[in-house]
Amino acid sequence: MVSDRQVNRLAEILVRHSVRAKRGEIVRISGNEQSRPLALAVYREVLQAGAHPLLAVGFEDAGRIFFEGASAEQIRHLPPTRVYEARRIDADIIILAPSNTRQLTHIPPKRMADRRKALQPISEIVLRRVRWVLTNFPTEALAQECDRSLAEYERFYYRAVLQDWGGMARMLGRAKRILEKCSVVRIAGKETDLTFSIKGRKAIPCAGEHNMPDGEIFTGPVETSVEGRIFFEFPAIAGGREVSGIRLTFRRGKVVEATAEKNEGYLREMLAADPGACRLGEFGIGANAGVTEFTRDILLDEKMGGTIHLAIGRSYPESGGRNRSAVHWDMIKDLRKDGELFLDGKPALRTGHLFGRIPAGMRKRG
């Protein structure tokens, strides 16, 4: 059973390290009924920082009710109050605590894509001006997704988040300097030989500022440069749907062939959602040695040491990526046993660790 000390330590990391709350600022705390212990610990920590907490707690079933009953006009509606709030808050701490990870699997993908498109102006405001962080609060549903008891999942989760994030930042800073000197990336492995350019793009080290747990470094591939094929060992999950055995072939940056062993139709729908959905928006390298097993939760899985991930769809502008899409869907490639990552022809992943180094951030704290 998780201890109050672990919850309080995570709250301290979120408020003091991730969003760096300052006196007089407005800090929104977004969650649901199941996130109550962590949301209240964060609320208390925000007050101690001298900032103004703004609770935004909703009900998990509301999303399902909305997608089941909303008209096309309601799906396209941009709530002006949410736009106003996005322009006024200084920080946003988002806590995910699902009771059912399959809540929206029966919703047509187009409805969900249309809703993301409608809310995109809010997302862009938040990404541009708000310090934000996303985390989980362990629930039975998250534990069941990775075939663990809740107690086992809690131990796994807090091992991944209660770290020396300053040490992780220093290690990823070294990786940033290497990546930004690189022109060509090659990924080789099972049914995989994929190349693309990252010349002129910025590498973004992630050490707990936006995700918790964190521990990755990412950039934006040059949109027209992707060539070759790739197979993803792990399922990709979006909207509660699991697509497994994904194989993609790229030419001149676009997906020209896409198959999956499970839910291939959903994969094809996502790739056709808009013109940018069939191009890569992100290339990332996992560097969190505390994440050792696949959990079916991208918040953890994309950080797994010894893996890389590619996202179809929207680029992050801070990386220099220019691809625009309502879709951003991460897919994970395991290179720990069968595969290699090359930067300008030189191997970059050895023994499951970035550039052969065990991440300094794995020195546990608290």
Image (cartoon, rainbow, N blue to C red):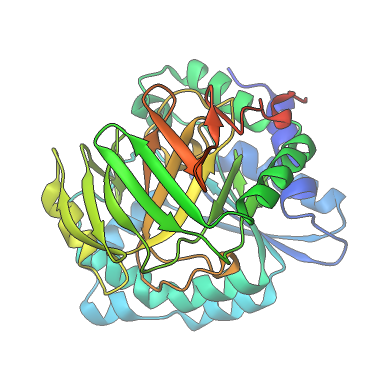
| Residue ranking furthest to the front | 345
**Is residue 237 placed above or below 138 in the rendered structure?**
below
Horizontal side of 250 relative to 329 (left or right) equals left
User: Which sits in the foreground, 25 or 287?
Assistant: 287
Depth order, front residue of 145/355:
355
Q: Position of residue 250 (x, y in %)?
A: 25, 57
- Vertical comparison of 32 with 364: above or below: below
Residue located 46% across and 38% down the image: 341
Residue drawn at the location 72% of the way across and 31% of the way down: 361
Q: Seen in the image, is 78 located left or right of residue 48? A: left
**Quarter of the figure with residue 329:** bottom left
Picture quarter containing residue 77?
A: bottom left
The quadrant of the rendering that contains the C terminus is top right
188 relative to 57, above or below: above
* Residue drawn where x is 62% and y is 27% of the image: 356
Percent coordinates x, y for residue 358 in the rendering:
66, 25
**Can residue 68 be seen in the rendering of this structure?**
no
- Percent x, y of residue 271: 23, 62
Residue 358 seen in this snapshot: yes
Q: Position of residue 125 (x, y in %)?
A: 58, 76
